[in-house]
Every structure is written in C-alpha cells, then in structure tokens.
Amino acid sequence: MVFKDVIKKLAVSVTVAGVLLTPLFANAAKVEYKWKMVTTWPKNFPGLGTGANDLAKLIGEMSNGRIQVKVYGAKELVGALEVFDAVSRGTAEMGHGAGYYWKGKVPAGQFFAAVPFGLTAQEMNSWIYSGGGLALWQEAYAPFGIIPMPAGNTGVQMGGWFNKEINSLNDLKGLKMRIPGLGGEVLKRAGGTPVLLPGGEIFPALQSGAIDATEWVGPYNDMAFGLHKAAKFYYYSGWHEPGTTLEALVNKKAFEKLPKDLQAIVLNATRVANANMLAEYTARNNAALGRLVKEHKVDLRPYPAEVLEQLKALSEQVVEEEAQKDAMSKKVYASYKAFRDQAVDWHELSEQSYLNARNPQ
Ligand code: CA
C-alpha cells in the first residue's frame, strides 16, 4: 500500500470515529507575511542578537509559518543606530534595539530602556506591563508610525572597563567613555565625555585609545567582544543600567495588515522573548565572570561607596532635568517616578530584605 492510500484509509477511519482530522495531517501553513527585522546588534551576537533570532523564530512557530521574519544584523540592511528610522519608514516591518539609541529622535524612549539608579528588570517589566508604562511608550512612538514592545532584558549590567583605577569622582573627569543614554548625561555632569558607539565598534575604539573606557552589558557579552583584552579594571555595579529593556519595534501599517490572531501572536511572542533573554543572562553571567577573573586575570573592583553616592546625587539632578526637556518625557517620567517610589517601598520589604537575609554582608 502506498503512503497516499494509508493516509486515505486512516482519514476515513478517523472521520468515522468523529475525530477532527485536519490537525493530524496539517503541514506548516503557507507563508502569508514575509517580514524583515533589522537589529542594532552584530548578527547572532550572544544574548542580544540571538534574542532577536529567538523572537523571529517564536513568531514563525506560533503562527505555524504564516509569518516569516528574516533577521538582519547591524549593517546588513541598515546601520546599528538606523533601526528606528528604518522601521518608521517601512524599510523593515520590525526592528530590535534599545530606546536610548534614538534619544535624539524620541528623548522619552530612554526611560523605557534604562534610568541610572532606576528600576531593575523585574520592576521595569512590572511598570511596563502592569503599571501603565506600555500605553505611554506606544504614545511616545505613535508619531513615528511605530508600535514598541519590550523584547528582552539584560538585568543589572556591569559598571564598565577602565585602564585606570576609579577612586574618586575626580577620576571620571576628562574620561572619554562609551556609555549611552541618561547614564552618559550623568558622566558628562561628572566631567567626563560620553561617546555613543554601537556594540560592534567598541573593542577597536577601546584598543586604539579612541575611547578611554567603556561599558557594554555584563560578563557574558563583554567577554564575547573580548573587552578584557583592551582594559584592565572591570568595575561594578552598573548604576547607569540597572535592568535595561530591549525593544521590538513594529511598523504600525504592517501590524495593522495582520489579522487579529497574528497580531496577538506577534504581541505574545515578544513577551516570551522578553522573559527568555533575562533567563539567559541570569544563567550565563556568573560563569562568564568566573572565566574573566580566573582565566583572563581581570581585576574586578567595586566602585567605592562614595563614588556611587555622588553618582546617585548627580543622576537625580540630571534625570529630573532631562525629563523636563519635552512634554512626552515629562509625562513618561512622572509615571516612572510614581511607580519607582512604590516599587522601592515594597521591594525594601520583599526583594531587598530577602537578599540581605540570604547574603548577609
Ligand atoms: Ca550598557
């Protein structure tokens, strides 16, 4: 009996049994939508680039192949920092990046990426999904025809790579450091010069001395770029990026062309990708840190408490001032701040008090 006949015979018996036949023999559906996703990350870069790949794969699997998303690394279709514009004009239906990379276009966007001494990953998700953040984020990007969604989180980042010790705030004076967003504005207030570079350009800039110092993400990602080969001291903690949210950008017209079920799939795939990325960073950072210290002899240092206190005071001034520069930032920051105040109160009794009990100093 040939295969076709087996199927026919089986089909008859299954139909007779009154069972819904279709799912048993369904193949992947026909591709109905072919989308491009441009990203700020080097292609397949661990955590960030693979997070974008994960999102594209999830959309494909959840839609049974009806939406096919092809991922482009930085410079494959557009430059790392051109992702926002490319999605806005429809060159690509989707993008993957972080809100502080386009702060020149949408200053309010940086509050949805990272705020110095601001919300942690858990708190960012809580503000965005359950504290009114998402609606404000959508409002901020609406004039550009873009729908934003959280699509990953790094957790608390590392403070950065330096070739000299940081013993006082004075040591940051005159320092040319790669550091994006609001953290960069704080460095400027401390007398340093912030430089905005996409990830792929950091190592050569640090090695050639074009920049004196850099931050990137954390041990897992920093080791992948080989930053330990270009700087001696590795400082913590990442006061400037306490739980950075990565974002998926969707062109509004492309999104509205989708039927409701596929719209729900795109939205929910970003939720899964968002959780997956944080899980990956949490799982891999500590092992990578061990290798940096043991194999690569990196000099790991905490920022002196006094330096962090001073940076915190400067951050409060800078963030407050930046938030007053345009109406949307003002509105977003009011929501962020109110949420932070209540999260801080609750987390003092919950997360913080538990961590103190678990890991007494
Ligand atoms: Ca960073």
Image (cartoon, rainbow, N blue to C red):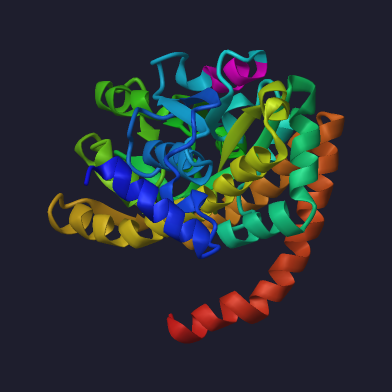
Q: Residue at x 23, y 37 (%)?
A: 226
In the image as oriented, which residue stretches furthest toward the left?
295
Q: Main secondary structure of the magenta part?
A: helix
x, y (%) of residue 222?
31, 42
Report if residue 134 is visible in the image.
Answer: yes
x, y (%) of residue 34?
51, 23
Residue numbers of the magenta segment: 82-88
> Quadrant of residue 177 in the image?
top left
x, y (%) of residue 131?
77, 57
Q: Look at the image and tell me in which quarter the C terminus lies.
A: bottom left
- Residue 85 lies within the magenta run: yes
> Quadrant of residue 120 in the image?
bottom right
Q: Residue at x 80, y 41 (%)?
A: 136
Q: Residue at x 43, y 52 (%)?
A: 11
Image side of residue 103 versus residue 225, left or right: right
203 above or below 82?
below
In the image as oriented, which residue stretches furthest toward the bottom?
357
x, y (%) of residue 304?
44, 58
- Residue 220 lies within the magenta run: no
Q: Residue at x 67, y 30 (%)?
A: 258
Image side of residue 51 versus residue 245, left or right: left
187 above or below 119?
above
Towards the viewer: 349 or 190: 349
Report if residue 158 is visible in the image.
Answer: no
> Quadrant of residue 70 in the image?
top left
Image side of residue 155 versus residue 76, left or right: right
